[in-house]
């Protein structure tokens, strides 16, 4: 038998060591990647988006292509797209220019924004739409679609950003593109339903789509969005089963921290390193507490961006925008961060009419946040939050025609909105939990896992409660949510 040279044994040994090292690293990586028990299903309709920021022209050039499947039993008489950015054209219509948000949204005074449609086609044929309103927020395409058939739409347009701190706006730090991209209308109960752009709250209403997207930006810019990756001016990603795609385009390179937690991925971006570290620590704790109660986060990635904003925070599918302004109370900040995190379980994965039933995701998310606070921070912090946000809301005297189920356009300001939708809406859930002897969390865990990726209305929720508990919650629902006293 021939002896192998020493150098050959060295190669064999090195290869074995490398294989062993690779196996160890793979096992460690596998342990760091928690198993997901609640992944959003793929939607039956899709949107492909390409966007490029044109620095000289100060506009975002956008191309969107949709493939929309008619899953209803009705023939669509036409197809409708919402152009929400056009609500920002005038001070009269802009949701950022309401009395409640004007000064915080526009520190330097009102600034308009909007979109300019350059091209549109239906099933490959050029067709410029008619508009159902004077503001240009609702475009109507002349094509009928039978049940079970699909239609292809394509639009190219330019977005000009308001100079301000609203969800659609630009300042020296970033471009905010939240609830501003074109989106289809919702066909429901034999008619088209569209999302209102009220001055209070977020009245968004759009179907769930799979979003594939690509964004080109100048050198040195950075893009934050769920599922996003890239560098050197090119960023792309995929967001399944969402009612909107929302982006933050940073005019520079933010500090970024990322890790796996809560059954998914958490990414935090901001310009202040210590702020990013604190936000990351708190949201990681929040996601872990929520996932322990309600299963893995339905959104595969939660991306948190800390930057100047007109409000303390807001949540969209897979994206949370958090104000980077200093806060006076760590406890208040922690509680609100839990609420925005909880919306990734009970708002973002569903299609709910934001104008007429915004109370449902708000109340569910506030309930889940308080349950997670009890688990993560203890009974004292939980009791303080419940007293300040739920018990106080039940004692507060508000206009007697307002209930949690009132349309958003009825609310005078965000304080009344929160007191009713989150406060009294959450109080209803406490009453349901009492009636069911503390079993509401078990029901909500099943709801989050089974219903995510589909529509969720108040009626859907009541019917699911009745099936699960074999109890009639209608009187309680009418008493807390839909009682009008004139």
Image: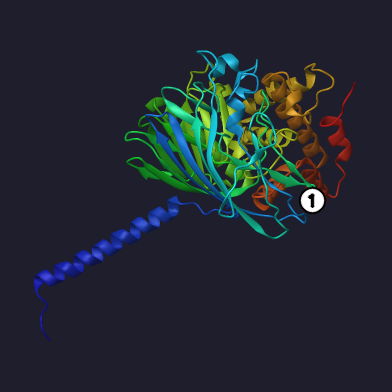
Answer above or below: position of 462 versus 109: below
Answer above or below: position of 69 versus 184: below
Left or right: residue 80 compared with residue 462: left
Left or right: residue 20 compared with residue 351: left
| Secondary structure category for the residue under label 1 | helix
Q: Quadrant of residue 271?
A: top left
Question: In the depicted view, which residue is nearer to us: 55 or 388?
Answer: 55
- Report the residue at 63% width, 24% height from top: 95
- Report the residue at 76% width, 35% height from top: 429
- Place of residue 473 in the rendered image (x, y in percent of width and height, measured from the top left): 85, 41
- Place of residue 14 in the rendered image (x, y in percent of width and height, measured from the top left): 20, 64
Report whether residue 44 is seen.
no
Disc 1 crowd rating (10 Å Cα; few below 14, some 14-19, many 20+) is few
Question: In the depicted view, which residue is nearer to us: 405 or 105?
Answer: 105
Report whether residue 68 is seen.
yes
Left or right: residue 444 compared with residue 245: right
Please state the total of marks drawn on the protein image: 1
- Place of residue 400 in the rendered image (x, y in percent of width and height, measured from the top left): 84, 19
Q: Give the position of the C terminus as an image quadrant.
A: top right
Q: Residue furthest bottom?
A: 1
**Residue position marked by numbered label 1 in the rendering:** 468
Q: Quadrant of residue 93?
A: top right
Q: Give the position of the N terminus as an image quadrant.
A: bottom left
Q: How is the image coloured?
A: rainbow
- Place of residue 236 in the rendered image (x, y in percent of width and height, measured from the top left): 43, 46
Answer above or below: position of 103 versus 4: above
């Amino acid at each position: 038998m021939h002896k192998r040279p020493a150098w050959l044994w060295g190669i064999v040994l090195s290869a074995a060591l490398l294989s062993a090292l690779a196996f160890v690293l793979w096992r460690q990586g596998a342990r760091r990647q928690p198993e997901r028990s609640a992944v959003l299903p793929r939607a039956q309709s899709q949107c492909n988006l390409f966007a490029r920021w044109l620095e000289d022209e100060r506009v975002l050039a956008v191309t969107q292509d949709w493939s929309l499947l008619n899953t209803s039993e009705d023939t669509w008489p036409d197809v409708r797209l919402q152009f929400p950015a056009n609500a920002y054209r005038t001070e009269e219509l802009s949701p950022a220019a309401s009395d409640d948000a004007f000064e915080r949204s526009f520190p330097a005074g009102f600034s308009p924004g909007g979109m300019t449609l350059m091209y549109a086609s239906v099933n490959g044929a050029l067709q410029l739409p008619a508009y159902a309103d004077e503001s240009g927020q609702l475009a109507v395409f002349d094509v009928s679609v039978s049940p079970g058939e699909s239609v292809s739409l394509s639009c190219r347009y330019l977005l000009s950003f308001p100079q301000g701190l609203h969800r659609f706006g630009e300042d020296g730090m970033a471009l905010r593109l939240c609830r501003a991209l074109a989106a289809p209308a919702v066909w429901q109960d034999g008619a088209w339903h569209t999302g209102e752009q009220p001055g209070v709250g977020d009245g968004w209403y759009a179907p769930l789509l799979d979003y594939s997207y690509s964004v080109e930006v100048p050198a040195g810019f950075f893009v934050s969005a769920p599922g996003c990756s890239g560098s050197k001016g090119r960023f792309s990603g995929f967001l399944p089963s969402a009612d909107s795609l929302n982006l933050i385009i940073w005019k520079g390179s933010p500090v970024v921290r990322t890790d796996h937690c809560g059954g998914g991925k958490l990414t935090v971006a901001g310009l202040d390193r210590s702020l990013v570290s604190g936000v990351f620590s708190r949201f990681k704790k929040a996601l872990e507490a929520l996932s322990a109660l309600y299963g893995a986060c339905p959104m595969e990635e939660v991306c948190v961006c800390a930057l100047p904003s007109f409000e303390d925070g807001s949540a969209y599918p897979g994206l949370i925008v958090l104000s980077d302004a200093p806060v006076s109370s760590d406890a208040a900040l922690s509680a609100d961060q839990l609420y925005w995190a909880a919306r990734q379980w009970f708002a973002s994965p569903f299609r709910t009419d934001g104008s007429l039933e915004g109370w449902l995701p708000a109340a569910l998310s506030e309930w889940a946040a308080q349950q997670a606070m009890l688990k993560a921070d203890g009974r004292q912090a939980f009791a303080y939050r419940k007293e300040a946000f739920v018990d106080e809301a039940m004692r507060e005297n508000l206009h007697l025609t307002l209930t949690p189920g009132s349309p958003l356009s009825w609310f005078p300001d965000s304080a009344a909105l929160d007191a009713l939708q989150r406060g009294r809406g959450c109080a209803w859930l406490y009453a349901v939990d009492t009636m069911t002897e503390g079993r509401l969390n078990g029901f909500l865990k099943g709801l989050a896992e089974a219903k995510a990726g589909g529509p969720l209305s108040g009626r859907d929720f009541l019917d699911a409660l009745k099936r699960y508990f074999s109890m009639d919650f209608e009187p309680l629902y009418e008493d807390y949510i839909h009682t009008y006293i004139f």
